[in-house]
Amino acid sequence: MESTYETCLAYELKELGLKVEQQLALPVVYKNVKLNAGYRIDILVDQKVIIEIKSIEALTDIHTAQLLTYLKLKDLKLGLLINFNEVLLKNGLKRILNGYL
């Protein structure tokens, strides 16, 4: 279901005129070697905001750590975790700014 939520959210963001990239590969550079570690950003908005989509019972620290890793690797400041498996969507939103919760 996450892929459906991702596709719909990306569509809505594009309709607002934002530049949206989906399933963006995120390589790791280690000792000047670019490694494909299998990281993929769900949605990158205007080269500024990473959005990670979930449809799970509850967000956990591992999801936060995942997003923090992506932010550090892309050298970005803002990320959103969105869990669509909530009665009220606002209860499934978590904003990550500059590595602070």
Image: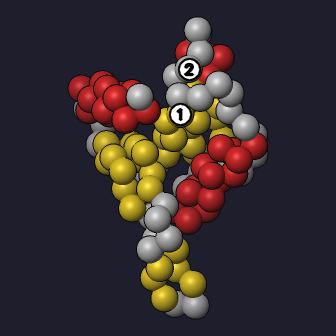
Give the quadrant of the N terminus. Answer: top left
Q: In this rendering, does residue 61 appear at all?
A: yes
Amino acid type, mark 2: Asn
Is 37 located above or below residue 74 in the figure?
below
Q: In this rendering, does residue 49 appear at all?
A: no
Residue 79 is situated, as x and y percent measured from the top left of the image, at: 57, 43
Is residue 57 toward the left or the right of residue 1 in the image? right
Q: CA–CA distance between discs 2 and 1?
A: 8 Å
Amino acid type, mark 1: Lys
In the picture of the structure, the residue carrying the numbered disc 2 is 85
Q: Which of the marked residues, 2 or 1, is nearer the chain's N terminus?
A: 1
Residue placed most toward the observer, 37 or 88: 37
Please name the residue shown 48% across and 88% down the image: 33
Residue 45 is situated, as x and y percent measured from the top left of the image, at: 39, 43
Is residue 69 toward the left or the right of residue 19 in the image? right
Is residue 6 toward the left or the right of residue 89 in the image? left
Give the quadrant of the C terminus. Answer: top right
Residue occupying the far top of the picture:
87
Residue 21 is situated, as x and y percent measured from the top left of the image, at: 32, 48
Please name the residue shown 39% across and 62% down the image: 25
Please name the residue shown 36% across and 50% down the image: 23
In the picture of the structure, the residue carrying the numbered disc 1 is 54
Is residue 90 toward the left or the right of residue 42 in the image? right
Residue density around tag 2, few if under 14, some if 14–19, many if 20 or more, within 10 Å: some
Classify mark 1: helix, strand or loop. Answer: strand
- Disc 2 vs disc 1: Cβ atoms closer than 8 Å? yes
Say which mark, if any, is on residue 12: none
